[in-house]
């Protein structure tokens, strides 16, 4: 392996690491209990049976928001009625980190993108 190949490999590895730090996806269980979701602010999508159910923002931290969903916390905007103890392990989430100050704009962008793709949110 030549020098340029090593540089290219390092760049690809760096890009992959940066992408993993910026966003991710997991089951709701792994995002919360497996601590795959970061405790930082960001935006997210919630899927149940491969259908987009919610686009949201988590200014207090993604893991906290996912823990509210997983534990079935009542009240506030976090409670999603379709997530139950029986089906919560079938819920998947995707997230992207962003500063809390940009979360609202990014949430709107994700919502508009979903609508443009023909997805209907409950």
Image (cartoon, grey):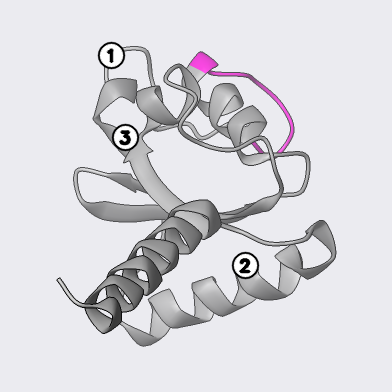
Q: Residue furthest right?
A: 101
Q: Main secondary structure of the magenta part?
A: loop
Of tags 2 and 1, which is closer to the observer?
2
Question: What's the CA distance linking mark 3 and mark 1?
Answer: 11 Å
In space, the residues marked 2 and 1 are separated at their CA atoms by 28 Å
Task: Return the mark for residue 107.
Answer: 2
- Tell which residue pokes out farthest to the left in this image: 1
Determine which residue is flagged by label 3: 91
Q: Can you say which quadrant of the picture contains the C terminus?
A: bottom left
State the image coordinates of residue 67 (x, y, percent, origin top left). Answer: 57, 23
Point out the tag, 3 or 1, that comes first from the N-terminus. Answer: 1
Which of the labelled discs sits on residue 86, or is there none? 1
Which of the pair 101/75 is nearer the observer?
Answer: 101
Q: Can residue 82 be seen at all in this image of the molecule?
A: yes
Residue under the image location 28 percent in, 78 percent down: 3
Q: How many marks?
A: 3
Q: Label 3 neighbourhood size at 10 Å, few (<14), some (14-19), many (20+)?
A: many
Of residues 40 and 65, which is closer to you in this image? 40
Which residue is located at x 42 percent, y 69 percent? 15
Q: Relative to 34, is 118 on the left or the right?
A: left
Q: Nearer the viewer, mark 3 or mark 1?
A: 3
In-image side of 74 versus 3 (left or right): right
Label pair 3/1, CB-CB below 8 angstroms: no
Write the start and end of the magenta stretch as one range.
71-78
Residue 7 horizontal/vertical position (percent) = 35, 76
**Front residue (pair 11, 108):** 11
Specify whether residue 17 is painted magenta. no
Badge 2 crowding class, 10 Å Cα cut-off, few under 14, some 14 to 19, many 20 or more, is some
């Amino acid at each position: 392996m030549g020098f340029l190949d090593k540089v290219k490999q390092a760049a690809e590895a760096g890009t992959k690491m940066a992408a993993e730090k910026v966003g991710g996806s997991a089951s709701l269980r792994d995002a919360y209990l497996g601590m795959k979701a970061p405790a930082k602010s960001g935006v997210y999508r919630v899927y149940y049976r491969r259908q987009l159910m919610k686009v949201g923002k988590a200014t207090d931290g993604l893991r906290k928001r996912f823990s509210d969903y997983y534990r079935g916390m009542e009240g506030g905007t976090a409670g999603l009625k379709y997530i139950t103890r029986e089906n919560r392990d079938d819920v998947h989430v995707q997230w992207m980190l962003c500063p809390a100050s940009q979360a609202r704009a990014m949430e709107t962008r994700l919502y508009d993108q979903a609508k443009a793709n023909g997805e209907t949110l409950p």
